Image (cartoon, helix red, strand yellow):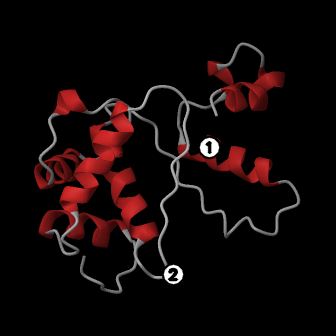
Amino acid sequence: MKRLELMPTDENILKSLQEDIFERNQELQYFIKLLNSIEGPYSIAVNGSWGSGKTFFVKQAKMVLDAYNTDFDMIDEKRNAIKDSLKLKDQQIKNQCCIYYDAWKSDCDLDPIYSLICSITAGYKHFNEKNFKNKDNFPGDILKGM
C-alpha cells in the first residue's frame, strides 16, 4: 500500500477511487463485500498506526456505500463515477445508511452517547420526528438500531 499524505476531502476521496491512488481499491471492494455479508448489528475495528490511512479508508468506504444507497442524495455524475471505479455489482450492495462519527472530536463531551446520537440524526435525513410513533422516545428508537 502506498503511503501518501492526502486530506480526506470529498474531492480527494473521489479522485483516489477513480485513479486508485493508494492502490487499495481491491481491499476496499473486499471490505464493502464483508459489510454486505454480515447479518444484524455488528462492530468492526479498523486498526493501524497513526497516519496509516484509516480515516481515509473509512471515508472511502462510506462514499462507496452512499453511492450504492438509493436513498442517499448524491449527484448522478458523482454516483456513477464512484460505481465505475470499483468492480461491484449493484445487486451485491445493500442499501446502508452510513454515519461517520469522529470520536476524537467528541472526546471531551460529558455524555458521549449524546454526541453519537447527534451525529446519527444529522447524518441520516430520515431520522426526524415524523418517522417515529412517539417523539418522546426518539433517542430510544435510535438506540434500538445500534
Q: Nearer the viewer, residue 129 or 32?
A: 32
Q: Residue furthest top?
A: 133
Please name whichever residue, 134 or 42, is drawn nearer the observer in this view of the structure: 42
Image position of 36 with respect to 11: above or below? above
Which quadrant of the rendered structure holds the N terminus?
A: bottom left
Instruction: Classify residue 52 by image quadrant.
Output: bottom left
* Placement of 61 over or under 108, stated as above or below: above
Q: For mark 2, what is the residue?
A: 50
Label 2: state its secondary structure: loop
Label 1 amino acid?
Answer: Ile
x, y (%) of residue 93? 27, 33
Q: Nearer the viewer, residue 121 or 85?
A: 85
Give the residue displayed 17% in from the left and 50% down from the top. 77
| Quarter residue 10 falls in | bottom left
Question: Mark 2 or mark 1: which is in front?
Answer: 2
Callout 2 environment at 10 Å: few (<14), some (14 to 19), or many (20+)?
few
Q: Secondary structure at mark 1?
A: helix
Percent x, y of residue 15: 21, 69
Q: CA separation, marks 2 and 1?
A: 26 Å
The total of numbered circles placed on residues is: 2
- Looking at the image, tell me whether mark 2 or mark 1 is earlier in sequence order: 2
The residue tagged 1 is 120
Q: Residue at x 31, y 31 (%)?
A: 70
Outermost residue, right direction? 110
Frontmost residue, 15 versus 74 = 15
- On the question of residue 127 being in view, the answer is yes
| Residue at screen point 79% across, 54% down | 112
